[in-house]
Image: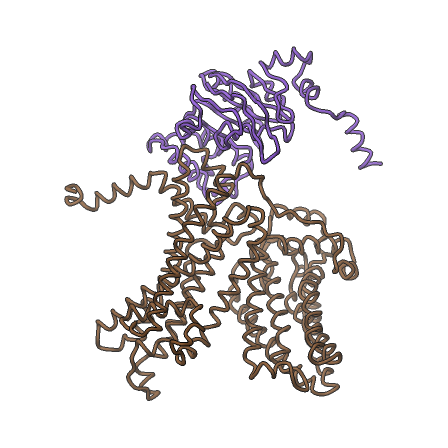
Amino acid sequence: MLEARGLSKFYGSVLAVRDISFSLHPGHVLGYLGPNGSGKSTTVKMLTGLLEPSDGQVVFDGQDIHKNLIAYRKRLGYVPEEANLYSYLTGQEYLDMVATLRAMPKRHKNRTISSLLQLFSLWPHRHVTMGSYSKGMRQRILLIAALMDNPDVLVLDEPLSGLDVTTVLVIKNLIQTLSARGKSVFYCSHILEVVEKVCSHLIILRKGQVIAQGTTDEVREHMGKSSLEGVFLHLVEDRDVVQMTQDIVSVVSP
Amino acid sequence: MQRMMQNPKRFFRQRWEAFSQTPFYCLLRLFFGRMFHGHADSDAGDLDLGIGVIVVLLAMPGMLVSLLMFEKYGSLIRFLRGAGPYDPFSATIPDEYFFLVLSMAVSGAAALWRWDSIFLDRRDFTNLVPQPIRLRSIFLASLSAIFALVALLTIVVNAASMVLYPLAVVGSQPSLSLLLRFAMGHAVVMLLAGAFGSLAVFAVAGVLMTLFPAAAFRRVSLLVRFTLALLLLVLLGTSWAVPDWLKQLSVANAHRVAVLPPVSFLGLLRTVWGRGGEPFVAAMTKAGATALGAAFFTTILAYAVSFRRSFVRIPETPDAGPLPRIPASFSPLAPLREAVLRTPSQRACYHFVARTLLRSDGHLQVLSGFLALGLVASAATLNSAPTLHSLVHGSSPPAEFLSVPFILVYCVSVGIRFAFEIPSQLPANWIFRFWLDRERHEARPIARRVLLLLSLSWLAPVCFLATLAFWGWIVALRHTAILILCTVALVEVFLVKFRKIPFTCPYPSFKSYSGLIVVAYLFGYVFFTYYLPQMENWSLSGPWGILWFAPLLGIVLSAIHFYRKQMLDMDKELVFEDVSASGFE
């Protein structure tokens, strides 16, 4: 089980997140929502051990992850927000490198990479350098890299960015299947419809603080809203969306 | 041990296979590759040449100079010249100095070129740190990659001279031991000098990275690289003067040249050859060894500290991206720009081109390189005057003085013209494809204005003021007018078949006559920076001499005009692919 216990993070004197606590149990998919600048990426970086919290701790199976970061990362799959890959490596070379860094056995590594490249429709492009990959292809490479070592915890930061409809459907089903197999998934996204569909639990963040937390149904019921979009707008947005739309139209077409 | 003795080939193959599957080797290969293939912004127009081409380019200078040495030391040629036997250890001092300078300069320049690729960046952090590997492994692999690069650079730069030069000098002598002694000493010290050149650049980069925050480092980085490039060119320039000084040196005034690293390494070379008995040579040997050690340890130390300070803290620092700009409320060039940029598309494209040229690291590096070349060539030209006094006294300015702005204009213009061919964010060129009319485009007027504004806007006033200070109004006005007219003609020649929006096309492909184009540029340099100032010098001696320039420039501009007129319409259309007949003309 992955736990965040009272996580706070300061960048200099600027507070990014304050006192975030939650538990991610095996089989759960935790959706993490919030507007831009609310502290989502900071939380993700702390969960993956890329950033040390100013206060609080991230605990995995009862142990602070920073006590044995290598062992923790061996059980973690991570899809970062941006597909910032080595453009001069081919897809296969990149996956081979990640597998080697994860110390996957050679035979298992080759078999897994080949199978996943075929399943994600990247097999014909495996020897093409990633500089010429589309955004969706790069995203698929990141998903393969996160999945191939059979991690217990998946941290996905906008994993559907740039993917085509079929792959989006596959990934949504994949997340649910993996959670059914006991994997923990931390799902950070702006796409409310997907979060509503795939996440069993939900955290909504605003200005670095948790403002709603619980199962997706609990949050909806608590706010008396029929959709997650309604909950989100109610909790997060200060601005009147309709008025804002009219203002934009009046500027471009006075 | 027993297995190794039984089948050593199999033993080492198995060891190698096991090593190649380790994370350390994987990282080492990755970091070594990134030094050749560019950093995180490489998609933004960094010139990606590949290892093979880089190796050939680096090896060429040493090979060419070594081949020339066969003419100098060949026994037949010496016999025909009537030259007698010589001591190779004394007679080769000027050449050894030149090879030392060449080794340091080329290795240093190669290190400067890969400056941005040696430090790990955000992309490395995002891809590597989430993997189950220690930061220490990343650091060690990265440092090892730097030393592997230094080793490769120094070997490649000196490979040809290590083989060919000893053969040229002592190949004809009967003693094999003499050849081996000469060759070994030359090879060892050239490699050390090359390593020093690269390590010194890496050490400077590491120290800057350690001292400055990431954003400030990016700001000073270009300036420092420009200064280092200038220093390397100056170092190269010393190879003509220093060997003569060395002949006249005594221990008492040795300190005059002791600051030059190649002199120290020359001392090291003399010591390796067993000629280090003189106190001056001993002092130089000590200085050379100290400099090399200092560069080596500073590189390690600075890199370790900068890794700790910059790489490990990447998630805490916002992505720097392009350098933030301070919005200028007043630009002295604004009224001039408003006057010469007549149409909306000219204004839009001019701002795009000028900003790309001045903000993109890759383009600015090219421009800085040519400017540095121009400054060194100007200094060499001024230095060639009989006396400093003669440069600024007399009835009219000497040709050496007059040629300086011509050299700078030529180098800056060629730099900008070359930079125009380097693409920048090609997928973003759709905006020009979408909006510009291919038949009524204004590619040439835009390029012309950029070239003229970026060269003359600062050079013409400087030229005018410098001439005014020594020769008064009339000469200053004439000199500046001739410079402006000649620059206009030069720019027209450079843009004779130009039909692209700069930076929006892929690299031009190599053409069969690309070599001829380079030769034309070299001849152009000689004509523009030597013959034109000579003509101007002659024209300034009389009141109407300047009028001779009018028909000359008229002929050039008319020829360009008629050439363009007879071109087919399809050859004048705006292009976004490399379909032009001549590419980089």
Q: Identify the residue shown where x is 57% and y is 64%.
A: B370
A243 vs B110: above or below? above
Foreground: A231 or B301? B301
Q: Residue B190 lies in what quarter of the image?
A: bottom left
B530 vs B99: above or below? below
B507 vs B412: above or below? above
Residue B505 image position (x, y, % from top left): 60, 53
Residue B495 in view here: yes
B28 vs A169: above or below? below
Q: Which chain is purple?
A: A
Q: Identify the residue shown where x is 61% and y is 12%.
A: A217
Foreground: B43 or B441? B43
Q: Identify the residue shown where x is 64% and y is 78%.
A: B402
Residue B557 in view here: no
The image quadrant where one finds the N terminus of chain B is top left
Q: Identify the residue shown where x is 63% and y is 67%.
A: B494
Chain B rendering hue? brown
Q: Which residue appears farthest toward the right when viewing the image?
A: A254
Residue B445 image position (x, y, % from top left): 72, 61
